[in-house]
Image (cartoon, rainbow, N blue to C red):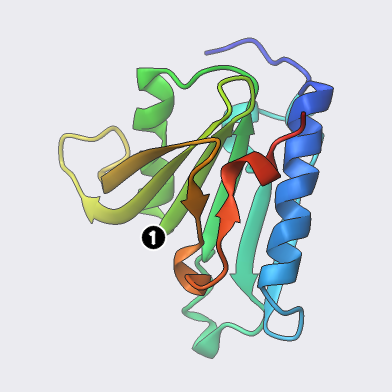
Amino acid sequence: MSTLIAPTKSAKTAELMTENWLRNVFPSDLYTVTGYAGTSADTDADLTPSVVVEHLHPQGGADATPLLVVEVSDRPLSAADIEDAGRHAAAGVRDFWVIEVKERRVHVFRDPRPDPDATHGSSYKQVRVYGQFALIAPLAAEIHLAQVVNLLPW
């Protein structure tokens, strides 16, 4: 288990920039964009996402799975962190992003599938790493592109 470390000012800024961009992408009458900036110092950092996008009114209550979960990291991802992404896959999150502030890149995890060899019983079959000048978009809003550098502080 890792030692809990308060997020840096850069990480908090990246969280807020990402949250603000997602609020512009997802209309508030259909979606909720919830930011948890700065809470990872108070709780287990491995269990607290930075930003979550969900349907405002899930149909029949069954579609309560987040559309997008974003975590912001002050340190490079380790193999254990990537394996831990499987908990989001097990929960059915189709789009999971990890923003590495210091490395200036975003890891995008998509296409969750059952995986008996994974720690959490599921893993992502599509994992891509985007550099700071790449364009990315949420699966639920593919026409809304953002350049990774616009989600990062200078």
Residue type for callout 1: Gly
Image coordinates for residue 86, horizontal then vertical, percent: 35, 41
- Please indicate, yes or no, whether residue 36 appears anywhere in the rendered image: no
Q: Tell me the element at label 1.
A: loop
Label 1 crowd bin: few (<14), some (14–19), many (20+), radius 10 Å: some
Front-lying residue, 120 or 31: 31
> Residue tagged by mark 1?
92
Work out which residue is located at the far top of the displayed protein and give it: 3
Q: Residue at x 47, y 49 (%)?
A: 96
Work out which residue is located at the far front of the displayed protein and give it: 133
Image coordinates for residue 135, horizontal then vertical, percent: 50, 52
24 is higher (above) or lower (below) than 105: below
Q: In terms of image quadrants, where is residue 6?
A: top right
Front-lying residue, 62 or 89: 89
Q: Going by the image, does 52 lie left or right of 129? A: right
Image coordinates for residue 59, horizontal then vertical, percent: 52, 88
43 is higher (above) or lower (below) than 20: above
Q: Going by the image, does 140 lie left or right of 128? A: right
- Please indicate, yes or no, whether residue 24 appears anywhere in the rendered image: yes
Number of on-image labels: 1
Q: Residue at x 74, y 69 (%)?
A: 24
Which quadrant is the C terminus positioned in?
A: top right
Front-lying residue, 16 or 61: 16
Front-lying residue, 16 or 148: 148
Image coordinates for residue 26, horizontal then vertical, percent: 67, 73
Q: In terms of image quadrants, where is residue 31?
A: bottom right
Q: Residue at x 75, y 66 (%)?
A: 23
47 is higher (above) or lower (below) than 141: above
Work out which residue is located at the far bottom of the displayed protein and give it: 60
